[in-house]
Image (cartoon, rainbow, N blue to C red):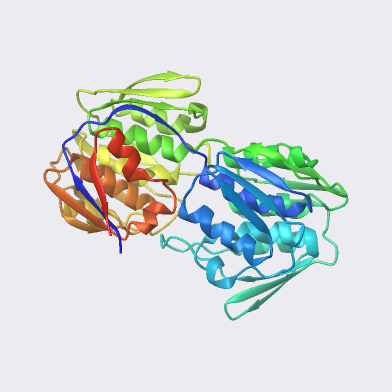
Amino acid sequence: MAKFIISGGNKLQGRIEVLGAKNAAMKIMAAALLTDEVSILENVPDILDIETMKGILESLNVKVTRFNHTLTIDPTKIASKMPNPDLVTKMRGSVVLIGPLLARFGQVKFAQPGGCVIGARPIDTHLDALAQIGVTIEEKVGFFNFKADKLLAKKIVLKEKSVTTTENVMMAAVLNEGKTIIQNAAQEPEIEDLANFLHKMGAKISGAGTNTIEIVGVKKLKGAKHQVIADRIEAGTFALAAAVTNGELEILNFNPGHLQAFIQKMQQAGVKFQLKSSSIHILPSLAFEPVDIKTGPYPAFPTDLQAPFSVLLTQAVGKSTIYETMYEGRLRYLAELNMMGAKAKLINHHQAEIFGPTKLSGKKIKTLDLRAGATLILAALIAKGQTEISDINLIDRGYERIDERLQKLGAKISRVN
């Protein structure tokens, strides 16, 4: 298995462009199945999760070709209603294929989705929402049978602000006659991006990005060309990397408006930066102040940046707190940070305290999930000595060539097989 070897102590300096958002690209790939015409997606990151989704589409006899960061998706010969179970169980995000396949074929057999091990991540919200619009669900050992002779056009209320449930219902309803209204919808920018792609296909959707979305069904959708929005989580990760190394880094080609809660916390923590319409310039900071982080659905502080932010908190003067409201297993990485010298106290599965500043030292540590892996890289960048991070395939799920891109900014990081 591959691992990263990182020697800490170097400041990150220069400029870096943010790549496409994985959490938008995967859903738009699924939406491309709603037509029998070819779609072209630009700014698609070259990461493992996208390759997994590509493999799932190909298991349905959909032709997917990549040229650099552009995917061409041809669903004209789609022939299966059961995505490859082995690939589905690798990635929970694959659940968004249920909606498009129901819209196209009225039925789908789907394995229990997988993904990062960060606590309980049931798909009950999906099952409840799909049942509300008339889908019959039969649960078997290891998979579900979904069937809908005719979907119901009606108002539904989601049990929670689930991003993938919102997207699933949007895509299931888009070819359904009548008006479907989703209340308590998630509001993430990636949902807006999916809606923008569906608009280009000919869908009639209003309210995406608010907590109430209306879908008026159309009879047919066409293929479309679309550029995926920039990855706000990648932008935040690089901003933190620059801040903790006391570097100076321009992070380009993303919308800072998608990271308002995160940027506010950086400011409270004493990070110096200059903000522009499509970039942020991180400047060297004298010292960091402790802050309290509470994650939540957009526009609250993003759960995917909670772990990376903790590295900055290890360098803040005083006690900081983390309240992870989304996933109960997402604080497990703190044990790895403590091995490196951090002083983090786990209060329960959702809350922790971090005391700083502490000096970190290089150790042999293990990636537990995608965002925990990015966190360990940030810690290694400021640790004294050499850090060895194993199981980096989990990092490759969501960050394209992160080692090569950090090298160009001055980091001492190498990939060893």
* Left or right of 15 in this view: 287: left
Question: In the image, residue 251 lies at what x, y percent?
Answer: 40, 28
Q: Toward which corner of the image does residue 233 lie, by quadrant?
A: top left
Question: In the image, residue 284 lies at what x, y percent?
Answer: 24, 23
Along the line of sight, the residue nearer the viewer: 44 or 264:
44
Question: In the image, residue 46 lies at what x, y percent?
Answer: 48, 48
Q: Toward which corner of the image does residue 311 lie, by quadrant?
A: top left
| Residue at 18%, 48% in the rendered image | 343
* Left or right of 358 in this view: 248: right
| Residue at 65%, 46% in the rendered image | 184
Along the line of sight, the residue nearer the viewer: 243 or 169:
243
Residue 301 appears in view? no
In the displayed structure, 363 sits above or below 235; it is: below
Image quadrant containing the N terminus: bottom left
Q: Residue furthest front?
A: 67
In the displayed structure, 116 sits above or below 67; it is: below
Along the line of sight, the residue nearer the viewer: 237 or 127:
237
Q: Residue furthest bottom?
A: 141
Residue 63 appears in view? yes
Question: In the image, residue 236 lies at what x, y percent?
Answer: 40, 36
Q: Toward which corner of the image does residue 146 lie, by quadrant?
A: bottom right
Image quadrant containing the C terminus: bottom left
Instruction: Tally the marks.
Output: 0
